[in-house]
Image (cartoon, helix red, strand yellow):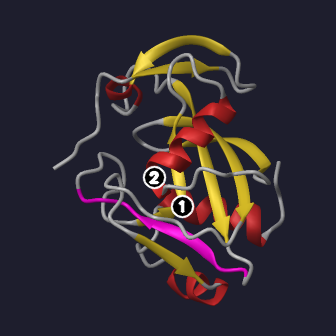
Amino acid sequence: MMHDNAHELLPVVDTEGHVVGNTTRGKAHSGTDGKPLHPVVHLHVFNSRGELYLQHRPAWKDIQPDKWDTAVGGHVDWGEDINTALQREVREEIGITDITGAEMLTRYVFESQRERELVHVFRLVTDIPPHPTEELDGGRFFSPEEIAGLMGKSFFTPNFEQEYRRVFLTGHQD
């Protein structure tokens, strides 16, 4: 069984994304130590029919295990820029190597009881089929109607629901 690396080194950033230090994944997710703000990338993958691909988070994940979530979501590693992190995470999680056409939609601060993240949100429309890797417990495309019917039922991660409402339902991308 896989597990998250608590010693993985992550950048600490200000709300504009400027690196101001570093921390470990364990400290960033501990809910203590001031919850250092660390950057992450999210990619929403749509097919040409308007369906949204979502990943199923494995039971071993330290945050929101066994929930459905954004197709790709991951930390920016220490020394990595946003675009490099996005390309790496897409390859590592869903096996897509060509993300030409991915567009950045917004950036915002997400805070939970355990962590604070500076989330960089991207969208990609492609008919290249995702191939979930061992980092995930599978995935599939959902229609907008399916997503609407499952919202608020603890099926999705709270972060996915909040981001989906913010970016795709209200149109606020700021």
Residue 9 in view here: yes
Please, what secondary structure does the residue beneath circle 2 have?
helix
**Residue at mark 1:** 71
Labelled pair 2, 1 in contact (Cβ < 8 Å): yes
* The image quarter in which residue 16 lies: top right
Q: Name the residue at 70% across, 24% down.
A: 17
Left or right placement of residue 130 versus residue 120 in this view? left
- Residue 151: tell me if it is visible: no
Q: Earlier in the sequence, mark 2 or mark 1?
A: 1
Tell me which segment is drawn in magenta: 50-59
Front residue of 113 and 174: 174
* Numbered disc in front, either 2 or 1: 2
Position of 123 with respect to 55 (left or right) is right
Of the pair 126 and 105, the residue shown nearer to us: 126
Towards the viewer: 121 or 135: 135
Using the numbered discs, state the Cα–Cα distance from disc 2 to disc 1 in whole angstroms.
Answer: 8 Å
Q: Position of residue 30 (x, y in %)?
A: 33, 31
Name the residue tied to disc 2: 93
Say whether residue 12 is left or right of residue 99.
left
For label 1, the SS is loop
Is 58 part of what is drawn in magenta?
Answer: yes
Q: Is residue 20 magenta?
A: no
Q: Nearer the viewer, residue 76 or 99?
A: 99
Residue at image point 73% right, 42% down = 107
Q: Residue at x 48, y 76 (%)?
A: 140
Q: Which percent across, then down, holds residue 173? A: 82, 54
Residue 167, percent across and down?
A: 75, 61
Vertical arrangement, residue 20 with respect to residue 2, above or below = above
Picture coordinates of residue 87, whole percent (x, y): 61, 41
Q: Residue flagged by tag 2: what amino acid is it?
A: Glu
Q: What type is the residue that disc 1 sits on? A: Ala
